[in-house]
Amino acid sequence: MIRRFNYTGRIPIKHADVPISLIKQTGNTFSFTAAPRLQDYTLPESALVNLDAYNPQDVRMHFHLGTVGNITIPEDTYLDELVDNDHIKFHLKVVDNTRRGLLFAEATAVTPSRPMEPQPPTKSLLPMGRGNLEQRAWEVMFGDAGPMLMFDEKFTDGQDLARSDPYFQAMIIPTVFSEILERILLVEDYHEDGEQDSWMGKWIQFAKRIGNVQEIPASDDEASDKKEWISSVVRAFCKKHKFLTMMLKERRAVEWLS
């Protein structure tokens, strides 16, 4: 049965009240963030808020954003089913959760904001390079300026793979991140009062943002406590970037072509 909405008396929602931003992910994939502002509209707090992402060529992707009284953005907002990312639009609908098909309000053809072209950083947290690693494909090397992700000189596309290949990223990036944090906390014995502008301070600030934590383990804490802190940050990092999800999607795409 085709579900039909009752559009009688629906309230138009201003596009300005449905800010949506696209986030560039691996390859040509995008995810999005949204922050609907519905408090100024006369709507039941229990009404359901749904969001469709679409473009003229592809199927719609449906996302449930909770209720008017409790907007909740789903954890997975990847738009991986939309092939044409140049013409993405969104359709927000506020629907009665008790009377089937009653549409309270909507915003149609919402155009998302797109990420600005990234500006070249003054200095990368993890620069990359090539050298003779004697049969090792890659290695994290540490110097006075901090860590560098090195690839063997014969591994000519290593840097490109690290930047863009989901398989490669899933396999090595979490390990690299863990190795750097272990160097900082277990070998260098960095503490909270350490120099914030040093390479270790910058990595720790990055780790705290990723792990959503305020403090790092104290210098005299057990090594096991420091390792558990590192593991929790790396897990949060992997969850944020969805390394496994993107790797499996890439595999399915390859199998489809084979």
Image (tube, rainbow, N blue to C red):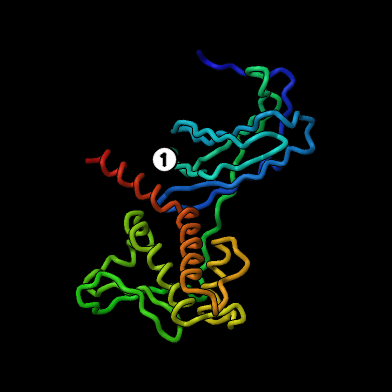
- Number of numbered markers: 1
Instruction: Residue 232: give x, y in percent of width and height.
Output: 50, 61
Looking at the image, which residue sits at the far top?
Answer: 1
Q: Residue at x 53, y 33 (%)?
A: 62
Image vertical order of residue 225 relative to residue 6, above or below: below
Residue at the location (39% across, 68% down)? 176
Residue 91 image position (x, y, % from top left): 60, 33
Residue 214 lies, in percent from the top left, at 63, 66
Which residue occupies the foreground of this view, 60 or 245?
245
Q: Secondary structure at mark 1?
A: loop
Work out whether residue 92 or residue 242 is closer to the camera in this orientation and state it: 242
Left or right of residue 95, residue 27 in this image = left
Give the residue pinned by disc 1.
83
Q: Residue at x 56, y 51 (%)?
A: 114
Amino acid type assigned to the residue bearing label 1 in the image: Val
- In percent of the image, x 51 and y 35: which residue is there? 54
Q: Residues within 10 Å of mark 1 (few under 14, many from 20)?
A: some
Picture quadrant where residue 238 is located: bottom left
Q: Is residue 20 left or right of residue 125?
A: right
Q: Quadrant of the C terminus?
A: top left
The image position of residue 211, as x and y in percent, is 55, 61
In depth, the one of 173 and 43 nearer the eye is 173
| Image vertical order of residue 70 relative to residue 195, above or below | above
In the displayed orientation, state which residue is furthest to the bottom: 144
Q: Is residue 64 left or right of residue 240?
A: right
